[in-house]
Image (tube, helix red, strand yellow):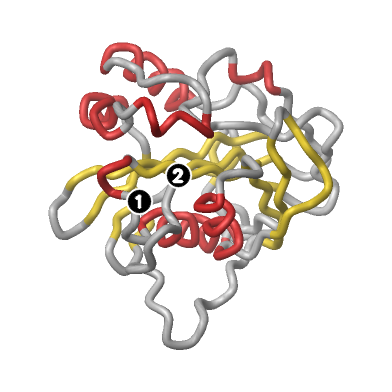
């Protein structure tokens, strides 16, 4: 336990914990999730903005094995959760964060192909000098979209990161992906003028704002990705 931030730490830094939200359980990614997640991510249309293509269970299992093993860079932590809808115990997608410790940098090559769909990293020109920085991503399967799951899960993750000392959140959003932009906005992020690989970098503090009065974040249509 880090006495300054209260973060659970391991050799590679932050260690994901289960995160409960109003309707969801964010569960620490395990290799055993590959079979069900392959079905969740099977729709080719899901990859229009996030890139890549659907992976078979065996390929996804191999990818999860590398992710679960953790980052080889002690200055960064790979935090990966699957999203479970609590009332039916079904997996619906995932959220993830790459946490960079102060004064560390993150190189895309560090993943050695281990990143899950949508998993990105800060570039080497972005040092985390003002405190831990987390680059976050979220994906919800096509059949589960339109229920506010991405917003609820991403906000739950953002709150967990903020409580454990992360200072800044970063996300990369395709300029045409309005649903993903809505999730980023709900997490307190705002677009910048920085582009990377055809996407806009969004940044904000790791403390998501409260939802607007009278708005149920769990039932808004159109804010899922």
Q: Residue at x 57, y 62 (%)?
A: 187
Q: Secondary structure at mark 1?
A: strand
Farthest residue to the left: give it: 88
For the residue pair 11 and 207, the one nearer the viewer reads as: 207
Q: Is residue 218 left or right of residue 213?
A: left
Q: Residue at x 72, y 43 (%)?
A: 200
Residue 44 versus residue 85 in the image, above or below: above
Image location (x, y in percent) of residue 106:
73, 30
Mark 2 touches mark 1? (CB < 8 Å):
yes
Q: Residue at x 83, y 53 (%)?
A: 130
Residue 106 versus residue 114 in the image, above or below: below
Quadrant of the rendered structure where residue 32 is? top left
Image location (x, y in percent) of residue 71:
58, 25
Q: Residue at x 42, y 80 (%)?
A: 215
Image location (x, y in percent) of residue 15:
49, 43
Farthest residue to the front: give it: 176
Q: Earlier in the sequence, mark 2 or mark 1?
A: 1
Q: Is residue 194 left or right of residue 198?
A: right
Q: Is residue 185 left or right of residue 131?
A: left
Farthest residue to the bottom: give it: 213
Residue 59 versus residue 159 in the image, above or below: above
Query: Which mark identifies residue 117?
Result: none
Q: Tell how many labels.
A: 2
Crowding at label 1, few (<14), some or many (≥20) Cα neighbours within 10 Å? many
For the residue pair 213 and 14, the one nearer the viewer reads as: 213
Quadrant of the rendered structure where residue 156 is? bottom left
Crowding at label 2, few (<14), some or many (≥20) Cα neighbours within 10 Å? many
Image location (x, y in percent) of residue 154:
48, 55
Residue named by callout 2: 95
Residue named by callout 1: 26
Q: Is residue 59 left or right of residue 159?
A: left
Distance Cα–Cα, label 2 vs label 1: 8 Å
């Amino acid at each position: 336990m880090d006495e300054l931030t209260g973060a659970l730490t391991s050799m590679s830094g932050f260690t994901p914990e289960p995160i409960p939200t109003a309707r969801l359980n964010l569960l620490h990614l395990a290799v055993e999730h590959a079979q069900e997640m392959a079905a969740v991510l099977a729709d080719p249309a899901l990859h229009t903005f996030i890139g890549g293509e659907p992976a078979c269970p065996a390929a996804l299992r191999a990818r999860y094995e590398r992710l679960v093993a953790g980052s080889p860079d002690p200055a960064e932590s790979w935090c990966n959760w699957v999203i479970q809808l609590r009332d039916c115990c079904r997996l619906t997608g995932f959220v993830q964060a790459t946490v960079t410790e102060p004064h560390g940098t993150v190189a895309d090559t560090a993943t050695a192909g281990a990143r899950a769909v949508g998993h990105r990293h800060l570039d080497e020109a972005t040092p985390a000098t003002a405190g831990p920085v987390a680059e976050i991503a979220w994906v919800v399967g096509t059949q589960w979209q339109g229920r506010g799951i991405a917003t609820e899960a991403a906000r739950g993750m953002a709150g967990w990161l903020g409580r454990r000392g992360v200072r800044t959140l970063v996300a990369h959003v395709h300029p045409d992906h309005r649903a993903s932009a809505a999730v980023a906005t709900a997490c307190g992020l705002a677009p910048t003028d920085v582009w990377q690989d055809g996407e806009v970098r969004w940044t904000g503090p790791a403390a998501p704002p409260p939802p607007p009065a009278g708005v149920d974040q769990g039932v808004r249509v159109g804010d899922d990705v």
